[in-house]
Amino acid sequence: MQRIAVDMDGVIADITEQFFLYDEKDFGKRKLLEEVMGIKELEAFPHSRKYVYRKGFFRTAPVVKDSREIVSELNKLYEVFIVSAATEFPQSLSEKQEWLNEHFPFIQWQQIVFCGLKTIIDADIMIDDHFKNLDHFTGSTLLFSQPHNLHQNEGRHKRVHSWKEIASHLL
Ligand SMILES: [Mg+2]
């Protein structure tokens, strides 16, 4: 069975939408998608560093469209691991695990990998929204489109815009 390393933030957890929501809560106005396209997260949402330390930020993140259904299908055909560089935000560990238990109950604890640098990760396929993770990976790489990576050339990585598109490649 092939192994897939699936990222959380920006791939199954809709952190971009969470930034929009927190930003709107703080400033009373929702940013436009065009305002953040092709811009690094920290520049697009200057307060994002503050948001990620707020209690509940990771626990209440929306689920990326179709990810639950398709990860559930992948889980039957592949060894699926949810891999998140979560130790950067220690308070996120329990929130992320609770979030996974709620939204991805078919993922067992053995399939959850909370780590620091993802260079330690070895699998056949990696799905991630950040080049810093994909660039070091030696297997096949799928770049999940997010506003922050839109204007970067995907290079050797295969860009995917949705979970439906991932399904068409892997199922
Ligand atoms: Mg990510």
Image (cartoon, helix red, strand yellow):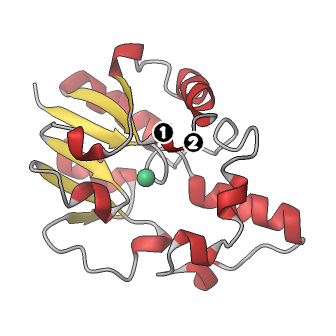
Q: Which quarter of the image is occupied by the C terminus?
A: top left
Q: In this view, does 49 lie above or below 79?
A: below
Q: How many angstroms separate mark 1 from mark 2 (CA)?
A: 6 Å
Numbered disc 1: secondary structure: helix
Residue situated in front as seen by the camera: 144 or 121: 121
Q: Is residue 105 above or below residue 57?
A: above
- Image coordinates of residue 123 in percent, x first then y, are 15, 36
Mark 2 is surrounded, within 10 Å at the Cα level, by few (under 14), some (14 to 19) or many (20 or more) other residues, namely few
Q: Is residue 93 above or below residue 117?
A: above
Q: In this view, does 29 lie to the left or right of 75?
A: right
Q: Mark 2 points at which residue?
A: 89
* Amino acid type, mark 2: Phe
What is the three-letter code of the residue carrying label 1? Ala
Q: Do the residues labelled 1 and 2 touch (CB within 8 Å)?
A: yes
SS at mark 2?
loop
Question: Residue 130, which numbered label?
Answer: none
Q: Nearer the viewer, residue 145 or 88?
A: 88
Q: Quadrant for residue 136, please give it.
A: bottom left
Q: How many discs mark residues in the rendered view?
A: 2
Residues 130 and 168: in front is 130
Q: Looking at the picture, how far across and down is residue 112, in whole percent? A: 39, 25
| Residue drawn at x 40%, y 77% as measured from the top left | 150
- The residue under label 1 is 86
Question: Can you say whether 131 is above or below 29 in the image?
Answer: above
- Name the quarter where the N terminus is drawn: top left
